[in-house]
Amino acid sequence: MKSNRFIITLIGIGLLGSANTVFAGEPIEPIAPVKEINLAQVELGKKLFFDPRLSKSGFISCNSCHNLSMGGTDNLKTSIGHNWNQGPINAPTVLNSSMSIAQFWDGRATDLQEQAGGPIANPGEMALTHEIAIDVLASIPQYVTEFKQVFSTNTINIEQVTGAIAEFEKTLVTPNSRFDQWLLGNKDAITADEHAGYKLFKDSGCIACHYGPAVGGTSFQKMGIVEAYKTTNPARGLSGVTGKEADHFKFKVPTLRNIEMTYPYFHDGETETLAEAVDVMGRLQLARNYTKTENAQIVAFLKTLTGEQPSFVLPILPPSTDKTPRPKPFE
Ligand code: HEC
Ligand code: HEC
């Protein structure tokens, strides 16, 4: 046990040493405002993110499972897809996901644009084909005009659709959390207990995996280093993508930004409370059994990571026409 902790501490120091992200001597950086964004694409992508006509049922949009009123998740153990299909894995938040090294728990999509094509055609999620999705959009004159304005072409294609959605997702960042205010020099922004929680988070080694502006999202790590994680969920993690035995049960380290909003926790969604998640992480990753007080302090610190949620006027979607392929909610 002791030697495991030692190794993890070393990994931690190694990571911190190599990261050029250290802000004011701290391993967590404040979230920077979005720069270099294509505003026309963002507006189009926002509509597409909310448009349920990109699903076979005409009922499921990206926002159904990544609800922007609820931290960019569905707060369900696993998601509900087409035909009330029981999803295989917990839906991660879309908030701050542009900061991750790759998308999905196992990293199988390299970026947001590649990711966005997946759910539309996934039979267990939106269950449409990309062809029908394009037919739907091309049948709606306002969409045709908007795509033309944004991409300067007369034909709509799936790369434009996923590109616009990805551009919108880049705006879904949550700056100005109380912890960021503290990082930026406002020492009263967090309480003594919250600060004690942050110190524990650093000193006991959580920071070896959860660091950087998103407090995660920077690496793939094994779930259950010191002690195996027990789950009935069949997900294998990174090894499913690389085929390497060494990658078995490695998952992308999730962001801890807005973590109080994105319950339930872990890839199987089996952990309902933040206190329990901290307890599991302490024991399984670091061989640490936190006292009640320590656990409460870490939880208090984690809640200071809730930032300003994206806010905007709900997009009004252009109506379908006589030519628009009709939804098939019960097929
Ligand atoms: C039926 C629910 C559902 C719908 C609809 C859905 N998603 Fe997801 N989304 C998920 C689940 C579940 C995952 C995790 C899958 C995995 O990792 O294997 C996920 C993963 C993601 C991720 C990766 C986040 C990360 O941290 O790895 C992004 C980004 C995302 N979805 C965006 C979208 C967009 C954009 C749409 C609409 C085109 C969409 N999703 C539609 C359930 C859904
Ligand atoms: C060795 C790397 C590593 C260390 C150390 C580590 N974590 Fe994690 N953490 C992960 C990985 C990987 C996951 C995702 C595991 C899964 O879902 O199966 C995770 C998940 C979490 C989650 C759930 C996030 C979500 O959205 O479901 C929380 C909360 C968390 N960690 C907090 C902590 C705390 C607090 C510590 C210190 C006690 C810690 N972690 C230490 C790698 C690590």
Image: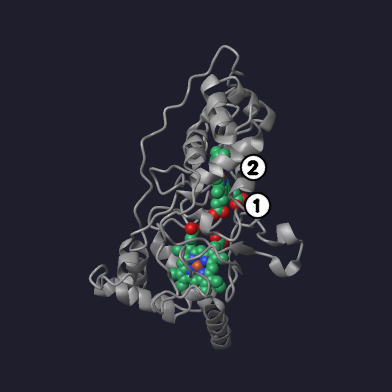
Q: Residues within 10 Å of mark 2 (few under 14, many from 20)?
A: some
| Three-letter amino acid code of the residue under disc 1 | Ala
Query: Does the beta carbon of the residue at mark 1 sit less than 8 Å from ligand 1?
Result: yes
Relative to the observer, which residue lies in front, 145 or 94?
145
Q: Residue at x 58, y 33 (%)?
A: 82
Can residue 212 be seen in the rendering of this structure? yes
Query: Does the beta carbon of the residue at mark 2 sit less than 8 Å from ligand 1?
Result: yes
Judging by the rendered image, the residue that carries numbered circle 2 is 118
Do callouts 2 and 1 mark residues in contact (Cβ within 8 Å)?
yes
Residue 54 lies, in percent from the top left, at 57, 30
Can residue 268 be seen in the rendering of this structure? no
Judging by the rendered image, the residue that carries numbered circle 1 is 109
Residue 321 lies, in percent from the top left, at 54, 15
Q: Where on the picture, by quarter, is residue 130?
A: top right
Q: Where on the picture, by quarter, is residue 87?
A: top right
Q: Secondary structure at mark 1?
A: loop
Q: Is residue 101 left or right of residue 291?
A: right
Does residue 81 lie above or below 241 as drawn? above
| Three-letter amino acid code of the residue under disc 2 | Gly
Relative to the observer, which residue lies in front, 312 or 126?
312
Does residue 137 lie above or below 282 as drawn? above
Relative to the observer, which residue lies in front, 316 or 203?
316
